[in-house]
Amino acid sequence: TVITYIEVIQTMSYKNMTDLTGDSGFLPTVIFTGSGQFTSAMRTAQLALEGITGYYEADFVDTITSLGPLCFYEDTKVVVVTINKATSIGTAAFSSCINLRAITLDTATSASTGQYLLTSIGSFCFEYCTSLRNLYIPDTVLSNLYYLCRGCTALEVCVLGNAYTPNMALNLAAFENCSSLKYIVIPDNYISIDGYAFAGCTALATVAIYGK
């Protein structure tokens, strides 16, 4: 009985992890299920079904092919995200996820071309993710990046992959008020940087451009 009681307490603590650093134990990984577009309603339902009320890491089954608009909007418990087979991420999908520390966007490639599957990232996607420290955008992403990381005050390094399409643009306020941003890599197929893209980036020391 004592052992069972301890196991119950440990399980409750695991599902209600209050330490996002992981120092007190591994964060639970939630593998979101479904097919087609993943939505906020699907996230809420599965977290409730699994009893997850604390910090967690998010993963996805291969049948989820896109992340819909606002699907993690203002989720203050998600800490780590790994994108698998999704080809697109919708508008403001992770906006205001203030404890999101890491996101991996380049885990899957096409068997026929060898290129990454992700091709589109919506506007405001990581806006106000104030714990995000670094970001790599795969070279297959063809969308212009409006307000991509505005207000990501902990972001230090960002690498934009060398997209396969010409005449890309770094659009409005993409990195506005990223006050910790020190280093960014931009491909030479980006032909314009629009207004306020780096406004308030007071720590920016290096802008490296591929091919230059």
Image (cartoon, rainbow, N blue to C red):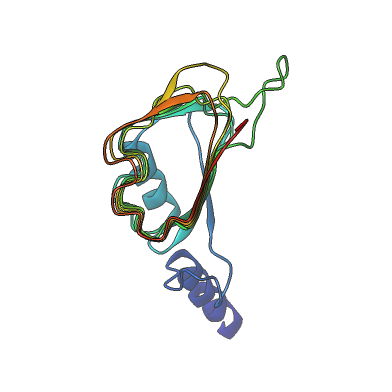
Inspect this view and state whether residue 148 appears: yes
Is 28 above or below relative to 8? above
Picture quadrant of residue 110: top right
Is 118 above or below relative to 61? above
Picture quadrant of residue 195: top left
- Measured as percent of width and height from the top left, residue 48 is found at 37, 51
Outermost residue toward the bottom in this view: 2
153 sits left or right of 142 in the view: left
Screen quadrant of the C terminus: top right
Please name whichever residue, 179 or 115, is drawn nearer the observer in this view of the structure.
Answer: 179
Is 17 above or below relative to 153? below
- Measured as percent of width and height from the top left, residue 82 is found at 55, 44
Please name whichever residue, 39 or 172, is drawn nearer the observer in this view of the structure.
Answer: 172
Screen quadrant of the N terminus: bottom right
Inspect this view and state whether residue 36 appears: no
199 sits left or right of 50 in the view: left
- Measured as percent of width and height from the top left, residue 97 is found at 35, 53
